[in-house]
Every structure is written in structure tokens, then in C-alpha cells.
Image: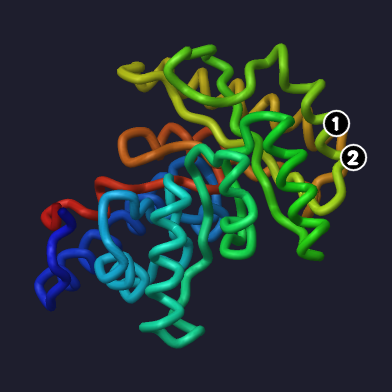
Amino acid sequence: MSPVASEQTQQVISENWQRVRLQVADACTKAGRVPDDVIIVGVAKYVGPELTSQLVSAGCRVIGENRPQSLWDKHVWFQAKQPPAANPSWHLIGHLQRNKVRRTLPLVDMIQSVDSLRLAQELSLEAVRSRIEVAVLLDVNLTQDSSKTGLTLDEFWTTVQRLVELPGLQLRGLMAMSSLGATPQLIEREFAQVRELGAQLAQKYQLPNDRCELSMGMSGDFREAIAQGSTYVRIGSELWRGVL
């Protein structure tokens, strides 16, 4: 059960946000990058809407949800309890089943976890039906870890070739995770592979803003991800330290 939101939790969350923001900025500086180049996605799968709202109040403007049902519930809460200006940008970062596409699509600004052509086709159909365009990242699994979702390298280019022809979808880049328990050196090598694949993608296809967005790095490995060009870091546990 998620803790009850209070003045104390707001203070802790705000302190966590500022610490993480400074850590990300420091990692950018060490990598020779501009801090504004990296967006922190606050992962809210651990908490309810009240604590999510406190994270937004602390300064986090992009919220990442792993489960569509949780995203639906929080979106309803924010619409009822918060003025439009206080609503964050919502990103789905977890697996999306095709039967949940219709309800999810109107609520999100980006789906980072497109892991199959069938899902992309369903998203396209719904986007066309709703007369909207949805930004997507392709979830890649270059480590071929069977416990993770995502496209293998063998599937990647065939999927991209089909996806870029689908109406209603705007391919922005790639999402990836490092191997569980990997050393910092291995993590950097894995993220470098994703960066190189993203560069090939941007060279072969015209992407928005002439760059490939890379969603790599979480609480334990965002420094390595930033060093390898990540533009979105998905931070969860570090933002809820002392709250959960």
C-alpha cells in the first residue's frame, strides 16, 4: 500500500528530486553534455496519485507508468483534482497489451515501450481512428535477455521498415535496459550498442528534430547511460527514498 501523502512526504520528495536533478546535471557535465539535453522521467509505479502529484509539485514534469491501468487511474485523479497546468506529461514505459491501446492512447504523450510490429499496427489503427499522432520509441533487447521484452537485433530493421510506413505513428528513437547485475563497464558497452543502433536509425530514416531519442538508464545506471547519449533517464527508487 502506498504511504499517505503529507507535508513530510512532500518535503522528502522535493529533496529527492533536487538531489537527482543535480546528479543528472553532474553526469551531463562529466560527459560534456548540456543538462537540459536529458529529461528525467519520474517512475511512479510504486505510488498512488497523491504522491505522484507531490513529485510533480517538486518539479518533475514527465511521469512514467509501467502499467496502463495505473496510468488510467492516475490520469482520472489528476483531471479531477488538479488544474490543467499541474498535469504532467505521461509516458508509458511498460509493456502495453493490444487490448489496452484504445483507452491508453489518448492519455499519453509518448509510448516508450513498443516491442512488436503487431503492437505498432494496433497503435496505428487507433491513432488514425482518433485522428491523432503518437510519439513512440522502440523497445530493444540487444542483450537478448529472455527475461526482458524488446526487439532483438535480428527483428529490428524488419520491424522499423514496416513501422515507418504506418500512419499515425511518429518514431522518435529507442528504449533499452542494461543487463541485470552488470558491471559499470558492461553497462556502458551495452548502452554504447544502443547508441550506435540509434545513430544508424537516424542516418537511415528522417527522425523528428534530426536526432534519435534514447531512453536508457534508471536509478542504478543513469550515469553510464548519460555518458552514452541517453536523452531520457527513467528514475524511480531514488525519487521515493525515505517515502517507501
Distance of label 2 from label 1 (alpha carbons): 6 Å
Percent position of residue 212, x then y:
71, 42
Q: Which residue is found at the position 85% from the left and 39% from the top?
A: 164
Reply above or below: 123 against 4: above
Q: Which residue is found at the position 53% from the left and 55% from the top?
A: 91
Crowding at mark 2 (Cα within 10 Å: few <14, some 14-19, many 20+): few
Q: Is residue 134 something one can see in this rendering?
A: yes
Q: Which residue is found at the position 27% from the left and 50% from the top?
A: 46
Q: Is residue 21 left or right of residue 196?
A: left
Residue that numbered label 2 is attached to = 165
Tell me which amino acid carries mark 2: Glu
Percent position of residue 235, x then y:
36, 48
Percent position of residue 77, x then y:
38, 74
Residue that numbered label 1 is attached to = 162
Task: Check the image and name the residue furthest to the front.
Answer: 99
Asked whether disc 2 touches disc 1, contact meaning CB atoms under 8 Å apart, the reply is: yes
Toward the viewer: 48 or 58? 48
Instruction: Look at the image and name its color scheme.
Output: rainbow
Toward the viewer: 200 or 3? 3
All told, the count of numbered labels is 2
Q: Is residue 44 left or right of residue 126?
A: left
Q: Which residue is found at the position 19% from the left and 72% from the top?
A: 10
Crowding at mark 1 (Cα within 10 Å: few <14, some 14-19, many 20+): few
Percent position of residue 163, x then y:
81, 36
Instruction: Name the image quarter holding residue 199.
Output: top right
Reply above or below: 158 against 75: above
Q: Is residue 231 left or right of residue 53?
A: right
Q: Secondary structure at mark 2?
A: loop
